Image: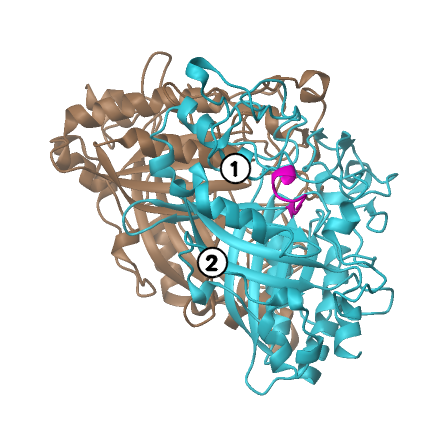
Chain colours: A brown, B cyan
């Protein structure tokens, strides 16, 4: 985890003293970027001061950025399919171009050639760019033998209402930044560089709380008003690396090129907010099993207090109902499965019926989707009280290789292996 | 202009010392909110320190908030039509509900009844809510005699490609905040309170640079990479109030209930970025008449230097071409017309052709649209070099009444007049 430092930089131009001023007080775990003296980019549980524009995340490292980086306030997801006729050579050239550009963008520098100038006045704003490969990528590039078994299609879930045109893709790019123009600038630069090699398949925009909007050391809140991500594994956990990242030394499960990589499951989860908001707060809390205000279990304590699964209340009923979302998703109820959830909220206006097209761009990271996402989702599929208020509308599963070493591009070990 | 102070507040909950810490260095005019000791909410040209979450804009005042308030990083526009059967009584009740809620939201307080809790941990984050009335509102409420002449439909422009379903509306609400969840919380609360009285007609999302992403004292940049808004009138200008606001004492032009109000022209201006970005920077600068890097006129100086309209260069050609956008829009070339531009950028993904559905949610404010927006747009319509790179896709014109006094609701002087 010690490979992505976030540094402070002077803003380009006339920043002077103000460019180095201490930023908004950001005590919120998951929002505040780590300060420059830290070798831990995840922020974790400690408070950190951050100046929004000057935060810089390093491109090179053991792992790609954007996995353990504190979640940013603005995100873009974009998937591409390789163009007809484009194969391994074109894909390698594209990943090389993209890596060069991602490194420049993350340093707050203009891209080579004609820059759009959209980000010209801003600092790096904690920009991260993360690249992944979908199932189809390996067939298109003649690299089927290198395709990880972990990329086998996810099982069908009964609650899925998947739109294929917004699912999957040969290539996936995740962009996050604490400034919307910096994020859009990166999206546009990377999309243009796809050139004739790849075509946009789908694209989604997301957001999270702005750094500084809250001073509470609290996990993110979603558009249902819930604190979301309480049980996320922490980089300080002994088994964090093992659960989230493919080992750096091959253990026979994954191909060697995935060393230090991870698998991302991406789900566009629509929230049926009109229905949800008709429930009283107490009824919402029974669906989740936690208090809305502070995320504490209904059995008491604070957000991080262990849930008392057997505790009963009036009439001998379980205080946390059997179908409560937080009960079902507890790692110790799922064979120790753990995934790192790093989502963005989304809101794409209203649909034809006048209902909000809003919810969660759920992104979770794990060393093995069959141990991380799948068993939890299977359980949710059978008995989660939350399921009647959400709808999975799109899905993706991507192999995200380890970070590029100095002079290397992302995916080089696959494409030139 | 002295009526909307922005104050600092402790964040709710456990903020303590961090809630009052100085925020990201925000020297950027138009981004940084004024500090608490200022009676001028517009920020203007002076640098100010701001803690993003704690900034609060006052609901009550001579003018509504969200007009001279520094533009926020997140915005929602939503238009409603009154429901069949809803008339003046229902409209008055709705504006009363909305005003009560807007005041609470802007103070960072939960709304009455069931709050969605989406904004629970955050401060007000400079939230503003602004209400306007469209042409149809007056017929539906039997108040046609009170309809301002200024609401007469805008003339057709040859470059218009207007989508009626995303244009107009009986009621218009503008929401801005420096936190995306605070903005969404407000959108959702106000939309729910419309209840049976009004139905969503259209809704759009926008964004601007985050406070703190840049330390340069610079005007906003749009998705074409241009500095945008250089010639905006400043509240310190002698004639600012006269140009932007309806006089507080009736002068016979506007109905009395519009005292202290303003007219908003809203245009969804799609940018044809694929075409635009094919131009070299020099060609783009000729289209605009200003340098991309710093917004200075092509005839030299800095962003605020007067453009030398007659200056010629090689071959005797004008340095600023006759059809340059910045030449055409200069107030002194348009009978002194002036409007206050306060836009958001938008990006709604890619269209079916794979082109970005992105551009500007252009919002301009003026005491009289026939003196502000219309003459400038007429000129642009005839000979603006920029016109082949943009497309007006939606349009709205709204009468925005003056701010509510203490104990009053917005529009009360119309609805109970």
Residue B222: give its label: 1
Neighbour tally class for label 1: few under 14, some 14-19, many 20 plus, Cα within 10 Å: many
Question: Is A362 above or below relative to A21?
Answer: below
Question: Is B133 above or below relative to B283?
Answer: below
Q: Which residue is mark 2?
A: B394
* Sooner in the amino-acid sequence: mark 2 or mark 1: 1
**Image spot of residue A4 (x, y percent):** 49, 22
**Image spot of residue B313 (x, y percent):** 48, 15
User: Which residue is more in the foreground, B409 or A155?
Assistant: B409
* Residue B332 drawn in magenta: yes
Q: Residue at x 44, y 70 (%)?
A: A388
Where disc 2 sits, the SS reads strand
Q: Given the image, what chain letter belongs to the residue carrying mark 2?
A: B
Q: Which residues are magenta?
A: B331-341
Pick the quarter of the image with the C terminus of chain B. bottom right
Q: Is residue B276 visible?
A: yes
Q: Which residue extends farthest top?
A: A407
Where disc 1 sits, the SS reads loop
In the image: residue B413, left or right of residue B121 = right
**Image quadrant assignment for residue A309:** bottom right
Q: Given the image, what chain letter belongs to the residue carrying mark 1?
A: B
Q: Residue at x 60, y 26 (%)?
A: B307
Q: Residue at x 43, y 50 (%)?
A: A361
User: Which residue is more in the foreground, A275 or A194?
Assistant: A194
Q: Closer to us: mark 2 or mark 1?
A: 2
* Residue A398 drawn in magenta: no
**Image spot of residue A270 (x, y percent):** 43, 60
Residue B318: give its label: none
């Amino acid at each position: 985890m010690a490979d992505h430092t976030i540094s402070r930089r002077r803003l380009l131009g006339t920043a002077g003293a103000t460019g180095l001023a201490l930023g908004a007080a950001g005590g919120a775990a998951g929002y505040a970027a780590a300060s420059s003296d830290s070798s831990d980019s995840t922020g974790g549980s400690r408070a950190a001061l951050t100046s929004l524009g000057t935060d810089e995340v390093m491109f090179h490292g053991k792992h790609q950025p954007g996995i353990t980086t504190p979640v940013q306030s603005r995100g873009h997801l974009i998937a591409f399919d390789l163009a007809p006729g484009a194969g391994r050579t074109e894909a390698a050239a594209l990943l090389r171009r993209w890596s060069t550009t991602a490194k420049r963008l993350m340093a707050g520098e203009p891209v080579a050639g004609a820059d759009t100038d959209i980000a010209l006045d801003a600092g790096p704003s904690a920009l991260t760019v993360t690249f992944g490969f979908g199932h189809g990528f390996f067939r298109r590039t003649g690299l089927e033998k290198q395709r990880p078994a972990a990329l086998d299609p996810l099982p069908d879930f009964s609650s899925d209402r998947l739109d294929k045109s917004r699912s999957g893709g040969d290539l996936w790019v995740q962009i996050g930044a604490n400034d919307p123009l910096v994020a859009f600038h990166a999206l546009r630069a990377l999309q243009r560089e796809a050139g004739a090699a790849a075509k946009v398949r789908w694209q989604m925009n997301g957001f999270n709380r702005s750094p500084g909007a809250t001073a509470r050391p609290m996990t993110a809140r979603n558009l249902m008003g819930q604190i979301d991500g309480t049980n996320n594994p922490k980089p300080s956990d002994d088994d964090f690396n093992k659960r989230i990242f493919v080992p750096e030394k091959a253990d026979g499960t994954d191909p060697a090129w995935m060393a230090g990589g991870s698998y991302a499951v991406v789900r566009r989860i629509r929230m049926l907010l009109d229905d949800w908001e008709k429930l009283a707060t107490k009824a919402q809390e029974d669906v989740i099993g936690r208090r809305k205000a502070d995320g504490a279990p209904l059995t008491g304590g604070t957000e991080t207090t262990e849930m008392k699964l057997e505790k009963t209340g009036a009439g001998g009923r379980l205080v946390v109902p059997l179908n409560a979302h937080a009960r079902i998703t507890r790692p110790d109820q799922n064979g120790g499965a753990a995934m790192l959830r790093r989502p963005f909220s989304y809101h794409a206006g209203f649909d034809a019926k006048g209902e909000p097209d809003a919810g969660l761009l759920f992104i979770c990271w794990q060393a093995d989707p069959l141990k991380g996402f799948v068993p939890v989702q299977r359980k949710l599929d059978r008995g989660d009280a939350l399921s009647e208020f959400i709808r999975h509308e799109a899905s993706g599963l991507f192999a995200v290789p380890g970070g590029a070493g100095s002079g290397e591009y992302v995916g080089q070990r696959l494409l030139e292996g």
